[in-house]
Structure formats: C-alpha cells, structure tokens
Amino acid sequence: MSTSLCIFDTTLRDGTQGEGISLTAEDKVKIALKLDALGVHYIEGGNPGSNSKDIEFFRRIREMNLQAKLTAFGSTRRKNSRCEQDINLKHLTESGARAATLVGKTWDFHVHTALQTTLEENLDMIYESLAFVKQSGMEALFDAEHFFDGYKANPDYALAALAKAKEAGAAWIVLCDTNGGTLPGEIREIVSRVASVIDAPIGIHTHNDCELAVANALAAVTAGARQIQGTINGYGERCGNANLCSIIPTLQLKMGYACVSDEQLKSLTGVARYVSEIANVIMPVNQPYVGNAAFAHKGGIHVSAIMKDSKTYEHIQPHLVGNKQRVLVSELAGQSNILSKAQELGLDVNPEGMKSREVIDRIKELEHQGYQFEGADASLELLLRDAYGDAVQIFSVDSFKITVERNAGQMTSEAVVKVRVAGEQVYTVAEGNGPVNALDNALRKALVQFFPGIRDIHLSDYKVRVLDEKDATAAKVRVLIESTDFKETWSTVGVSSNVIEASWEALVDSIRYALIGMDRDTEIAPTLLQSNGLVNH
Amino acid sequence: MSTSLCIFDTTLRDGTQGEGISLTAEDKVKIALKLDALGVHYIEGGNPGSNSKDIEFFRRIREMNLQAKLTAFGSTRRKNSRCEQDINLKHLTESGARAATLVGKTWDFHVHTALQTTLEENLDMIYESLAFVKQSGMEALFDAEHFFDGYKANPDYALAALAKAKEAGAAWIVLCDTNGGTLPGEIREIVSRVASVIDAPIGIHTHNDCELAVANALAAVTAGARQIQGTINGYGERCGNANLCSIIPTLQLKMGYACVSDEQLKSLTGVARYVSEIANVIMPVNQPYVGNAAFAHKGGIHVSAIMKDSKTYEHIQPHLVGNKQRVLVSELAGQSNILSKAQELGLDVNPEGMKSREVIDRIKELEHQGYQFEGADASLELLLRDAYGDAVQIFSVDSFKITVERNAGQMTSEAVVKVRVAGEQVYTVAEGNGPVNALDNALRKALVQFFPGIRDIHLSDYKVRVLDEKDATAAKVRVLIESTDFKETWSTVGVSSNVIEASWEALVDSIRYALIGMDRDTEIAPTLLQSNGLVNH
C-alpha cells in the first residue's frame, strides 16, 4: 500500500491574493464543486472575517455536502484582547465550515515588527485562538507563518510556537514558507527536525518566489510532511503558491504516494482549464502537465521521433492527467509536422507530391504575414482541407459595412452583410452590442435559414494581439476566436491592420469549420448541400 | 572567493522551440546583444544546419565581437557516414561560432528506436563528430540527450557515451534531462556519480515538465555541475527550459556562487521583459524575481506589514534584480493599499476623510463592473487625481461616429469626432487602418493644434479580453492600452460591451494622462492652459 497524502487546496483563499484574480461568490461555488470532484481533502473557501463575499460563499456552499472538508481562514486573535470579543474569530466560527485554519506568527522579527507585541503574548494568542476554535466544534489547523525564516532566526522560539499550537489541540501543524525564499535543502532539513521534535501531523505551504514552490513541497513530503497546501495553477500572492496541478501528478505517478483516484487524476487538465476560465486568467501554454503545449512537439527531430514511439520525448502518458499530444506546425518543424497533421485529418497525402510542397510554402508565407496556426487548429484544418480538395465553399461574402456611433452617451452598432449561399444572394442587417457582435448577428441571420444548427454555436473567447507595436493603432493585429458547440471547442485566426477585418476573417473561418463538421456528422441540411451540388466528396 | 559558475544561454535555440515563439534573424541579433550585456558566458545562437535564418544570424552576429562565446548547435553525424560528408556539420563549422554543442544519444532505447542503429555505431558517431568539430578549431561541447533516463535504463552504456565524448576532447559534458521527467533527488545522485567517474567539467540542461527545471539545475550544481544551460523566461520545447531569470539570482544571492556582476544582475528584469517583448509573448505577471507582480502586495495584512518593514514579506530586495515593490489596489486590499498609492502620487490624503471613503467605494464599484486597475496604473492615477481635486478636464468629447466598410476586397475605416477644448468645439474627420486607429487619428487631429507635444506619444500595445464568455461577441470586453512617449510607459483601461467604446475610453484616458504629465513638466502649452483657466493648481 502506498502512503496516502492529504491535499489542501487554497485556490479560493490564497489563490485570490494573486494579481488580476478576483472571484465572485458564484465563481467560488463553481470552483469548489470542481475541486471536490477532483478529490482534494480540504477546500479553504476564504476569510469570512475579511469580507461579506466570503460570508455569502460559506452560506451557499455549506448546503452542498462536499466530500472535502470545507475550511475557513483567519488569524489568531488581536493582541491584548479576548477571543470572545474578536469579530474575525466570531465570523470564523459562524461560517459553517467544518475546519478552520488560523495563521499565527513564529518568527520573532514579525512579532516585534508587524504585531508590535511581546513574544509571550504571541504564544498566548496562538494557544487561546486555536483552543477557542476547537471548542466551537471545528477542526483547528495552525498555519505557522514564515516558519522557515523564523526557525533560521530563532529556532527555539519558532519550535515553542508550534508546541503551543499542538498543546491547544491543532490537528495539523502547517509549516509556511510565506516569503517563498527558502531552498529545497533547507526545507528538507528543517521539516525533518520539526518531525523529530513535534508529535503532530505536519503540513507544508510554499510560495513560488524562487520558482521552487513545487520542489519545496516535494522536499517536505520526503522529510515527513503529510499535508500539502497549494492552489490550482499555482495562483497566489506575488509569484503564487505551490501548484497542485504539478504536485499531485508527480507525487502520484512518480513518487508512489496516493493523493486522488486514477479517474480523478484524469480530470486534472479539465479542472485546471476550468479554473483558469472562471478566474479569467490565460493559462500559460507551457504549463506543466495541463498546459496546451505540455505535450506539444515542435522541434523537427522530436516530431519524427515521437511518430516512431511517443515515449522518446514524453515523460508520462498525457491521458493520465487528461491532456493530449499535439504536433505543432511552424517554420522550425518542417514538413513532417504538417504532413502528420494532414494525415491525422484522414486526408489523402502524398508527402513527395507537388501539392504537399505548395501547402508548406503557403503556410510559411502566412506565418510570415503574422498568422499563427499553433493557436488556431481549425483555420489550419480548413487550409489543409482546401489544399487537398476535401473542403467545400459553403458560402461566400460579397461585402459588409459597419457603423458605430456614440451620441449623447448612447452607443449604437449596426452591420450590413451581402452573402452568397447555394447560388442565392442574401442581404441582411443586424444590430449588436459592438461591431463584431453586429457582424456575427448579421452573418448568422443570413445563414440560419439554410443551416439551423448554427444556433448551437457560440464564441467563447476573443483575443486581439498587436503584431508590430511600432505602428501603434495602425499596426497589424492578430485576432484569435475560440468557438464551441458545447461538444467541441475550436480556434480560428485572422490577421489584418484592421481589427474588424481580422475579426471577420476569424469569424468566417469559425462558422465554415462548424458547417463542414455538421456536414460530416450529417446533422444538418445534408440534403440541401447535396441538392445544391455543394458537397464534393 | 565564491565559486564561479558558467551560464550557457540557449534562448535563441531551445527557446525558439517553445509554442508561439518565432524570432527573425534581426530579433536574434537584438537578444544576443542583451544577453552579452547581462554577462552570460555562452550564447547558443541556433542550428545553422537546419535553416537559412540561423545561417543569416551567425553571419551578422560574428562581426559584433561578443564577450560571450557564440555557440552553434547541431547533432552528431548521420549513422553509417563520414563527418566530412555531413552537410549539417559542414554548416556548423562554417558558422563562424567559437564553440559548437553537439547533441548525441546516451539512452540505449533512443539508439534503437529513434536512430535505428547499433550501440557501437552511436559511440563512433559521438567520438568522430566531436573530434571533427574540434579539429576545425572550435571548442566542442557534448549535450548528452536523455542522459538521466539513459542512466536509469543502462548506466554502463550512458557512462560509456560520456567517456567517448571526453576522449574526443569535449570541453564540457552536459547532462540533459530532455523529457523533463527527472526529480531533484535523482539528479543529485546521478550527477554526483558522473562527477566521480568522468574527469571533465560537467554541465546541466533541464526541462520544466514537472515544474522542477530550476530545482533540478540547482540540485546538479550542489552535486558538482559547473555549467548551467537555460533560457530567459524559461522559454523552450513543451513546458520550457530551466529559467535563467530564476536560477541566476538564486545562485548568486542565496547560494553564494558567482555568475554575473552585481551591476549585471540589476539588469535582469529589463532583459527578461525585453526578450518577452521581442518574442511577443506576454510575461506572466507572477513570474519569480522579474515579473510585474513578483514584489506586488495585495493581501491587506501583507500591505500593512510591508509599510512597516518591507523585509516582512519580501525574500530579497527587489532592486538587486532591477525590479520594484508595488502595492495592488483591489477589493482584497482594503483602504491601506489605495491610500498608499495616493500618497505615492503626492496627493493630499486624509485617510479618515469622507473623500477617501468615496474613492474606495468608487474603485470597488468599477472593479465590480470589470475594470482592473492593477494593470492600468494611469487610469487609476487619473481617478485618484480627479477625486482629490488635482486633475483638470483638458478636453471633452461630445460625439463620435465610425464607419468600416469592405467592398470588392477593399477595406475603409473613417471616424468623425466632435471634441470640446478650451471652450471651443472642434469637429474633425480622419481615416485609419482600422476603426481604433481612425478614432485615434481624428482625436489627435482635433487636439494637436492645442497640444503639439501629443505628436510624441504613441500606443505600444492594445489588448482585448472578453469578460463574460457566456455572451460571446455580445459580452463585455476590457481593453488595456499601453502608451509611451519614449521616456515613460503607462497603461489605461476601458470596459464596455462595445469594443469600440472600451477602446475609446482607454484612448481618452491615455491622452489625458499624457497631457496632465506634460502640464506638470511644463513642456507643452502651459501658457495656453493657464490663459484658458484649465489649470486649477
């Protein structure tokens, strides 16, 4: 039997202290349900003493019967006062959470400088606050803030603070590297020392200020820690917290510890991307294990080797964490990547043929203009299908015109499009909340009578990037549009010095891709397409 | 004296294998010059055998007399052939680089599967290729690909491959964790073993697939490695390479090794941001040491403590790596952050006053609507100056109208604006490459007669983010505009369901901020402002 570890997630508390991260109570409920399904053991929901949003979250979530222990966060009581009079501790015990984490000082410098009190009073604050929480019927955890700095400065005092917490009945003593400045060797040594003198289960809470949060958490586990605190995608104050999305698979797939079930581990990539969407933070493509590029191969040698055996350049099987292998198309990759993509699509490819050479030249030329197909699989697929004669021109656009006006504080946006479908010209006008929305609406209005299934498609993300900053607002821009029909998600690209034209290009690609897919699935209007001679295969 | 380490930068080679990273020869020259000034010891410029762009780069850079050793990358010769006939080795020796890194196989599985040759032939390929490069007068380095996997599978063969490289005269034996799957403990153990049996200087090349690249590089150094290979910002294949921006300061500030001079270390943040701009990759705000949020404080407790002593929540002094402390404004932070920002601006703030409470409420309300001031310092400054009566309404906008049309493949964009300046109404029309550029042009046309200094300002970045994906193209969007006058850079924000309106709002803030700054510096039109009663302080 492998040793079981306890995963403590603080995405909803420490995670929200990261720059640019702001979650509503509703967002927090959604994320908590995902975390619960992932199988983490503690979900720290927030600080009910600090704001009404967190009180609202605790009110809503406590009725949902999570498997995980719902945990509220707070500090030890104020100096020279009584717990019964501490408004924050009152909110904590009334939150309805099953457990409470109390952060307290263990570094003498902080007691003097931040708290501005005596070392004795701080020990009393730790003891009394934990005992108070425990008396209210909750499980009490002690977050030993700045423990490693404290231990290095004054080991006796730092250990005395832990002993007080244990004496007060803390279920876990969590050692925090709050500033993120400690190195793995120090972590290993100090955790071992604590484990030898404090008879209580030990947790570890690390930050990423030296890009070592994951390594430090793993070092603590090898030294005896049994609870790991961290966040999804490593969100958190400053450089972030230890990233559970890297820690869980490493512990479980490489170090032989048990954290969650194999099935739950397969949901990891989905959870990571879901949380990044809700938090409205773009996930770095190169994020370990769960990033879109984590198993993406670009170097030509790598691609030709993984086509022989994927173990040659992959440290684990991507599906174990719910991710998948991708082959990137770019100037570095050369022919083998592009042709393997075309083969993946089931196209009739002759690697030596004229057509293959033309396709590669065309892609290189478009990349030179600023297109980026690595992030726009659907546009690339259309390009390949067009080249190998597998696609159809379902509709074409003759012209469009957009007007955006602001007058007396009122904004109006209107689009007119002239579209040709099945030999017929359709002329529509629509309003929208903005120019791209108006265009989208006018285009859908023109097409929906022919393809009713288009109603199920919607745009899920819209990104604009300036390609050549020297030309400011006259610069070329690249628009990436992500669309979904609730079953599949696809991305398309447009490039122009005009943001509307670039958006239009990506919009048309998105709808064309969806219609070709619908045609293949014969879900919509196959008869119409055939009767109009639009299907060529 | 502290031990000196050798820093080997491969941003221009392995870095470009990261998804979304593409550098022109010109980009590479610019980056190489920055790396040289940073003080790295080797600059690996690319693979002259793989593409003409890299040949062009080497042709241009070799005339620039870099301090660092310019290095070219290639593979050992093809199986069953002679080095003299190998076109890639020929390009390598003709590149003009002072050193060459040759990657070769040390894992028996790869010899059989990827190379499809015998173990003997692979050893000959390593020996002959390194000897060939050395004979051409270049320093030869051996990149032992997949060394750690190879050692675990067949230690005798992996060590035999290193011995061959040493025998051929390799100046460095570089151990590569090519798949990024090895853990720090294994790295430490295996590097120690190699150091005890191979009498040659050892290098380490790690990848970040387990989020352990930095920890693994440091573990190798403690076990005896003296060269560290990595990239700026950790760019590289899949999850990236070891991030030199985290490794260099940790080695130098915390572990007592010498890598670059103290002055050079202070350029680290600048180099990291420069490379991210050239590579056109957004730097994660939470990147350790050099990220915009690396020393940014958001939690209320943290902010009140760092105002007492910044050592309370900072592991190093930010200026040592050229970064700086920031205080973030958000709902989590509470009053202390906002007020410290206002004080920073020199405003007359009474923390207990009605006005301070109103400002905080207003910021909370705007954040609720989707504004984000953490990334828009200039908009926040305007808001604070407006609130504390320190700003002036230099101009106002009555109305605008934009038309974008596409007909017969031609795009046209036109904007009309009605602006009020100094009591006068100005009515202008302008064309542009897109709607925002047309608006920008029309607004400048209206203002330039009053404020000629406006000619020096330009927009350097333009970002759009969809805030509520459920509503697709009708969703609210946030526009962030970054502007510069070549001395200073500032960011402004606009939010609306209409991308044009949001852009307009950020555009107006950007120009207003610039005009107020010019007013303060009395560089432009102070007389005009005063004569029109526009200056109220």
Image (tube, coloured by chain):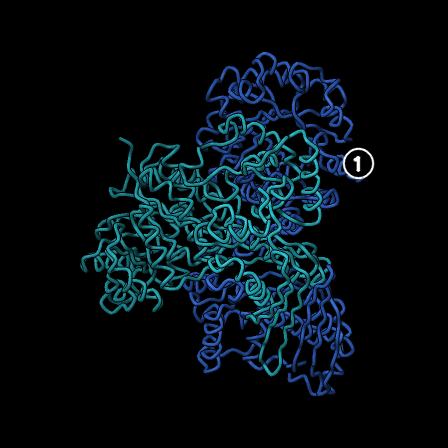
Chain colours: A blue, B cyan
Residue B490 place in picture, x, y as percent: 52, 50
Q: Is residue A391 left or right of residue B189?
A: right
Give the secondary structure at mark 1: helix
Residue B153 appears in the figure: no
Residue at the image point whose x is 51% and y is 51% from the top: B527
Of all residues shown, which one is farthest toward the front?
Answer: B531
Q: Is residue B403 left or right of residue B454?
A: right
Q: Chain of mark 1?
A: A
Residue B403 place in picture, x, y as percent: 65, 72
Quarter in which the C terminus of chain B is drawn: top right
Of all residues shown, which one is farthest toward the right?
Answer: A63
Q: Is residue B180 above or below residue A193?
A: below
* Residue on which disc 1 sits: A59
Query: Which residue is at the front of the view, B121 or B279?
Result: B279
Residue A76 appears in the figure: yes
Q: Is residue B447 above or below residue A44?
A: below
Corner quadrant of residue A473: bottom right
Mark 1: amino acid: Arg
Corner quadrant of residue B362: top right
Q: Is residue B398 left or right of residue A282?
A: right
Quarter in which the N terminus of chain B is drawn: top left
Query: Which residue is at the front of the view, B87 or B527?
Result: B527
Residue A287 place in picture, x, y as percent: 53, 50
Q: Is residue B17 left or right of residue B429?
A: left
Residue B60 place in picture, x, y as percent: 28, 63
Of all residues shown, which one is farthest toward the top?
Answer: A120
How many numbered discs sit on the rendered protein? 1
